[in-house]
């Protein structure tokens, strides 16, 4: 199992609100994609704040197929240019799950 984390810094509170609204209104296309297991959208509680998007995948190949898909490209077009400028560049980490408990 693979977990991908995208850490997105927020430089402006208004952009953070717009980003959170866009995420709550997202298409949810990822949830219908083969190999998708789980999605979480988080916000750090300490300033300077950043958002964390976490997705779980059966395999790394499943995740890569989604990242190169039209569905993924569509999800990134929902933010205004001002909001995009106020969000820092995302830092992405990909982890292999070795052990997990439910």
Image (cartoon, rainbow, N blue to C red):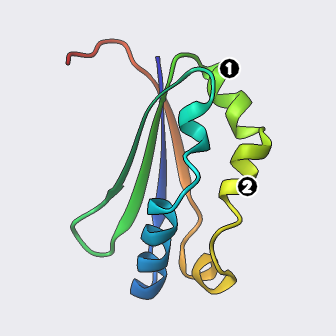
Judge depth for marks 1 and 2 and give the one in front: 2
Which quarter of the picture shows residue 97? Answer: top left
Give me the disc on residue 74: 2
Give me the disc on residue 37: none
Which quarter of the picture shows residue 75? Answer: bottom right
Q: Residue at x 63, y 81 (%)?
A: 85
Q: In this rendering, would 69 be left or right of 26? A: right
Q: What residue did someone put label 1 on?
A: 61
Residue 54 in percent (x, y) is at 43, 42
Is 79 placed above or below 65 here? below
Q: In this rendering, would 83 be left or right of 53? A: right
Badge 2 element: helix
Q: Quadrant of the C terminus?
A: top left
Distance Cα–Cα, label 1 vs label 2: 20 Å
Residue 10 in percent (x, y) is at 44, 74
Residue 47 in percent (x, y) is at 27, 75
Q: Residue at x 51, y 40 (%)?
A: 93
Which quarter of the picture shows residue 69? Answer: top right
Q: In this rendering, would 18 be left or right of 101? A: right
């Amino acid at each position: 199992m693979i977990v991908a984390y995208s850490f997105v810094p927020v430089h402006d509170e208004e952009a953070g609100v717009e980003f959170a609204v866009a995420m709550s209104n997202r298409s949810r296309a990822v949830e219908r994609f083969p190999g998708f297991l789980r999605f979480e959208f988080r916000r750090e509680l300490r300033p300077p704040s950043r958002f964390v998007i976490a997705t779980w995948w059966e395999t790394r190949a499943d995740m890569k197929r989604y990242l190169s898909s039209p569905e993924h490209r569509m999800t990134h077009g929902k933010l205004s240019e001002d909001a995009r400028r106020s969000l820092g560049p995302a830092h992405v980490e990909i982890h292999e799950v070795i052990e997990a408990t439910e």
